[in-house]
Image (tube, grey):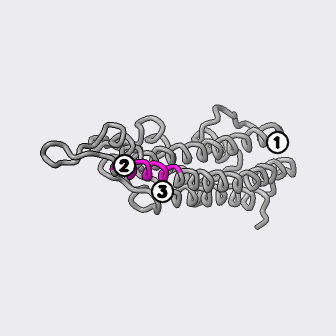
């Protein structure tokens, strides 16, 4: 059944808005990766310089100053923490775009008997399913929605997925991590590479592509 033209236009506007934003997010991630590499190189050089100046102790062992130990810890942990931040930013922007799409549709007053509630991703999903009498929102939505469990682990548990956590979100997160490129578990710690963020940007674009094609009836 064809949808009201105003609703179709709202979906197309949301699609265009994301297509405009997505490349900017990619550039943002790429530039941060470059800046991160440069910063790590400077830290490594500083460590090498400090090491060269160190003096052996009485037993002939090399003592490691506290400042070098701190620098090495930063080298080991800094990339992962910053990529956490990259992903949280990307996910947040996507969530805002989906919420804005729902508001555009709602403002047309052409979708009846459906309440627009909060703007979390689950609420937006429920609104879109009810508004268009859909049973799903496509494969890309499924992937991004599973990634929400990882987002919550990063935001609320500092990237720690405990072995003792056998909740449904934790089980979904483990399965998602095991089958997704660019993300892994190092013990209980979630490890993220830029490849994972780029993959999520692709899937997020797939969500808007699918919605536009499904609601407008045009590929």
Q: What stretch is highlighted in magenta?
A: 39-51
Q: In this view, does 214 lie to the left or right of 73?
A: right
The answer to whether residue 192 is seen in the rendering is: yes
Question: Is 135 in front, or is 50?
Answer: 50
For mark 2, give the secondary structure: helix
User: Residue at left 45%, top 61%?
Assistant: 180
The label number, if any, that marks residue 171 in the structure image? 2
Residue 191 painted magenta: no
Picture quarter with the N terminus: bottom right
Q: Do the residues labelled 2 and 3 touch (CB within 8 Å)?
A: no
Residue 40 painted magenta: yes
Tag 2: Cα neighbours inside 10 Å, few (<14), some, or many (≥20)?
Answer: some
Dominant SS type (magenta): helix
User: Which label sits in the foreground, 1 or 3?
Assistant: 3
Q: Mark 3 points at which residue?
A: 193
Question: Is 42 in front, or is 136?
Answer: 42
For mark 3, give the secondary structure: loop
In the rendered image, residue 186, in percent from the top left (x then y), is placed at: 33, 52
When asked about the image quadrant of residue 74, the answer is top left
In the rendered image, residue 187, in percent from the top left (x then y), is placed at: 29, 50
């Amino acid at each position: 059944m064809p949808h009201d033209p105003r609703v179709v236009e709202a979906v197309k506007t949301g699609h265009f808005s994301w297509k405009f934003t997505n490349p900017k997010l990619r550039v943002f991630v790429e530039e941060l990766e470059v800046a991160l590499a440069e910063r790590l190189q400077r830290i490594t050089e500083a460590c090498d310089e400090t090491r060269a100046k160190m003096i052996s102790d009485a037993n002939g062992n090399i003592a490691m100053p506290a400042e070098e130990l701190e620098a090495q810890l930063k080298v080991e942990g800094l990339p992962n923490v910053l990529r956490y931040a990259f992903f949280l930013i990307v996910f947040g922007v996507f969530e805002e775009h989906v919420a804005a799409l729902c508001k555009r549709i709602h403002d047309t007053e052409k979708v009846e008997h459906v309440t627009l509630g909060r703007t979390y991703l689950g609420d937006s999903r429920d609104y879109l399913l009810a508004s268009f009498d859909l049973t799903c929102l496509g494969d890309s939505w499924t992937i991004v929605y599973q990634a929400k469990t990882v987002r919550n682990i990063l935001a609320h548990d500092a990237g720690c997925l405990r072995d003792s956590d056998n909740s449904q979100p934790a089980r979904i997160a483990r399965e998602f991590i095991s089958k997704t490129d660019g993300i892994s578990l190092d013990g209980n710690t979630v490890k993220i590479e830029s490849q994972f963020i780029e993959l999520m940007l692709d899937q997020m674009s797939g969500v808007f592509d699918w919605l536009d094609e499904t609601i407008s009836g045009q590929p």
